[in-house]
């Protein structure tokens, strides 16, 4: 078996550069979906249900992309065709989603339109995102995989930083930050437009700069014969033969991604209530009167912009911590420590009522995010060999999607348990729960089994 040669820094950079644009789209989705649907009129207890669709589509699409791209060989490459098509669809949907309330539809029709657009957006982002992880597994040797995923983590967080800041920046330069009832502010709409333009430019750059290994050379580098390469993929048999790293890292992933699902869903409400003193209004639902935050108020929209700033601070923390991770000699210790720091960051948000003090919380949360982006894939791809790299990485995405689906399905019910009669739903409690989940994940890192 031939050894995959070392690649220059810039070749490693080019493999992942398109991830910058994809992550801008993902950051805009993560930071603004709760804000968009709250503006359209969604109840806080129902917000988590809107978040079921993204991971639900991911758990279907990403394994499918893995299986199909493992069998794809064409003039444009193996993974790149899926990357390009996914990005193109994402660009189109990004121009539609934030306009859900601008087409004169009823509230329910706007919600349905937004849900369909969200489903298409997350499907296309998943389709564009997964090939980047696969190309590192395909084209980078074991010695350089840590560096390659660190570069990918850096570009991912740099893209997140840009996406999170766009609404705040546009509001700062005078673009309207408020809108009529049920309509998304222009600052958010324009953010999606700019993000879509950057996404397609970055993906075109990677498409032009990266040449994947041809089939014969790929087979020689990965020690597979033509029969194995051309054979049909039996997913159940592959799962049965999966290395222990697949399952043990997957257990840690469960707690981590459930925690971050709660962050994406409930940070907006937490910051609006705890920091910006957003007024509450009474609404009647199913014959009962409840208190909710006034999503049409200036305070709520300012909080939405500030959440983008906090997520940007998280991205900065991730970039800084990602640079520090390679200095740790013990990968599992670095993983565990990162999750503990993130757990402390989540829990601290409950006690903080000053907008700038939250920077420290989200810097700590960024430490966990950096580890989650880099270390699981480094551990897993080092444990894999053969012709099913893409399929395994697609299946491994289930350890990201399943916990998000569980958290989204149960989030509303858990929030109901925390809500006292006559009070606004305490969304800050959900961030404390997220912190506890990260601490449990840190404890589970010890059982990870590395190696092939």
Image: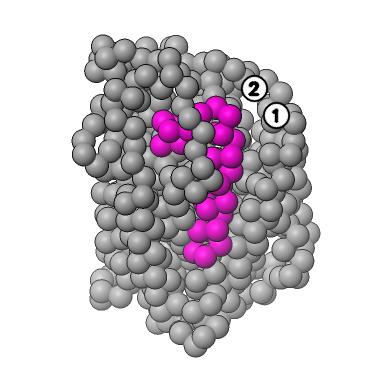
Residue 82: image location, x then y, percent: 28, 42
- Which image quadrant for residue 362? bottom right
Q: Please, which residue is most extreme toward the bottom here? A: 174
Q: Position of residue 228 (x, y in %)?
A: 30, 13
What sort of colour scheme is used for the picture? one colour
Q: Residues within 10 Å of mark 1 (few under 14, many from 20)?
A: many
Whether residue 443 is visible: no
Residue 410 falls inside the magenta stretch: no
Q: Viewed as shown, does residue 441 lie left or right of 194?
A: right
- Residue matched to label 1: 332
**Disc 1, SS:** helix
Pick the front one: 254 or 312: 312
- x, y percent for residue 171: 51, 81
State the residue position of label 2. Answer: 448
Separation of disc 1 and disc 2 at Cα? 8 Å
Magenta region, mostly helix, strand or loop?
A: helix
Q: Which residues are magenta?
A: 135-163
Whether the residues at callouts 1 and 2 have beta carbons within 8 Å, the answer is yes
Write the residue at 67% across / 20% down.
447
Quadrant placement of the C terminus: top right
């Amino acid at each position: 078996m031939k050894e995959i040669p070392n690649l220059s820094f810039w070749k490693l950079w080019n493999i992942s550069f398109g991830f910058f644009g994809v992550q801008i789209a993902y950051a805009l989705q993560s930071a603004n979906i709760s804000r968009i649907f709250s503006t359209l009129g969604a109840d806080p207890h129902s917000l988590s249900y809107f978040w079921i669709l993204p991971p639900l589509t991911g758990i279907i699409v990403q394994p499918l992309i893995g299986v199909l791209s493992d069998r794809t060989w064409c003039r444009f490459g193996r993974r790149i065709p899926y990357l390009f098509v996914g990005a193109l669809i994402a660009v189109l949907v990004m121009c539609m989603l934030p306009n859900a309330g601008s087409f004169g539809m009823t509230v329910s029709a706007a919600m349905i339109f937004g849900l369909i657009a969200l489903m298409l957006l997350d499907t296309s982002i998943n389709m564009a995102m997964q090939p980047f992880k696969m190309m590192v597994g395909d084209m980078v040797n074991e010695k350089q995989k840590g560096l390659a995923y660190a570069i990918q983590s850096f570009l991912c967080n740099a893209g997140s930083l840009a996406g999170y800041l766009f609404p705040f920046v546009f509001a700062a330069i005078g673009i309207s930050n408020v809108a009529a009832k049920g309509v998304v502010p222009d600052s958010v709409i324009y953010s999606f437009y700019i993000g879509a333009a950057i996404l397609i430019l970055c993906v075109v750059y990677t498409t032009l700069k990266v040449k994947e290994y041809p089939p014969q050379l790929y087979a020689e580098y990965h020690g597979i014969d033509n029969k194995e390469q051309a054979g049909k993929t039996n997913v159940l048999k592959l799962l049965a033969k999966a290395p222990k790293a697949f399952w043990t890292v997957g257990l840690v992933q469960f707690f981590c991604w459930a925690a971050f699902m709660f962050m994406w869903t409930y940070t907006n409400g937490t910051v609006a209530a705890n920091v910006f003193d957003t007024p509450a209004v009474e609404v009647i639902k199913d014959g009962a009167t409840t208190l909710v935050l006034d999503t049409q108020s200036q305070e709520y929209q300012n909080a939405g912009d500030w959440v983008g700033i906090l997520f940007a601070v998280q991205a900065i923390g991730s970039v800084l911590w990602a640079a520090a991770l390679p200095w740790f000699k013990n990968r599992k210790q670095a993983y565990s420590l990162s999750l503990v720091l993130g757990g402390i960051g989540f829990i601290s948000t409950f006690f903080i009522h000053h907008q700038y003090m939250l920077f420290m919380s989200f810097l700590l949360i960024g430490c966990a995010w950096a580890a989650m982006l880099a270390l699981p894939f480094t551990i897993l791809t080092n444990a894999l060999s053969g012709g099913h790299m893409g399929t395994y990485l697609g299946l491994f995405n289930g350890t990201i999607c399943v916990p998000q689906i569980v958290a989204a399905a149960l989030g509303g019910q858990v929030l109901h348990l925390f809500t006292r009669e006559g009070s606004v739903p305490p969304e800050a409690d959900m961030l404390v729960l997220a912190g506890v989940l990260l601490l449990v994940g840190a404890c589970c890192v010890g059982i990870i089994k590395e190696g092939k």
